[in-house]
Amino acid sequence: MKTYEKKSRTGVYGVAIQDKKILLVVQPSGVHAGKFDLPGGGIEYGETIEEALHREFAEEVAMTFDSFKFLINLTTTVEAFSFHQIGLIYQVDGLSTIQNGIHATHKYDWMPFTALSQETVTPFVWHICKGLLNTI
């Protein structure tokens, strides 16, 4: 069995909802490769949470947002990869596409909550969707 170096990462992630659908990216690689995930990622040295979230949305989905509001902090561990992830989760509102030639680095889509399963999404998405299913 392959052993992995233990890694811990703190990231910021955005929850965007429109018409009872959630904006999700497909992770191209890494621990959650092929799974639907929230747009977001690691906070770089010296970045504020807001700067990191704006950067991640620009990179991953070529979008920006007008406002964000704290929702929840989540933690997950993927033992098979010795990966410990801390997620600062924010609701984002006022999404718009960036028009200056920036292209999304990730495949993304607006997904209905009912189309998602625990096997197809990351732990953070599953936690968020379970809570939101009761409110839609």
Image (spheres, grey):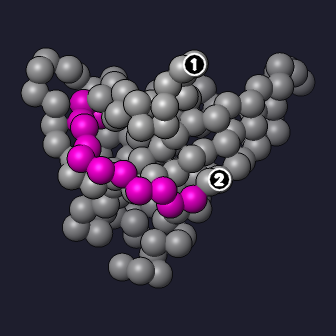
The amino acid on which the numbered mark 2 sits, given as a three-letter code, is Leu
Residue 26 visible in the picture = no
In the image, 88: left or right of 64? Answer: right
Describe the element under mark 2 as helix, strand or loop. strand
* Mark 1 surroundings: few (<14), some (14-19) or many (≥20) residues within 10 A: few
Describe the element under mark 1 as helix, strand or loop. loop
Determine if the magenta segment contains residue 48: no
Q: Residue at x 48, y 44 (%)?
A: 13
Tell whether label 2 touches label 1 (CB within 8 Å): no
Front position in the image: 45 or 83? 45
Mark earlier in primary sequence (1, 2): 1
Q: Residue at x 13, y 18 (%)?
A: 101
Which quadrant of the figure contains the N terminus? top right
Q: Gap in Å between the C-alphas at discs 1 and 2?
A: 21 Å
Residue 85 on image: x %, y %? 69, 39
Is 75 located above or below residue 47 in the figure? Answer: below
Determine if the magenta segment contains residue 69: yes
Residue 32 on image: x %, y %? 59, 36
Residue 7 on image: x %, y %? 77, 26
Q: Residue at x 52, y 40 (%)?
A: 12
Residue 35 visible in the picture = yes
Front position in the image: 20 or 73? 73
Which quadrant of the figure contains the C terminus? bottom left
Query: Mark 1 — residue?
Result: 45
- Residue bounds of the magenta highlight: 60-72
Query: Mark 2 — residue?
Result: 74
Residue 64 is marked as none
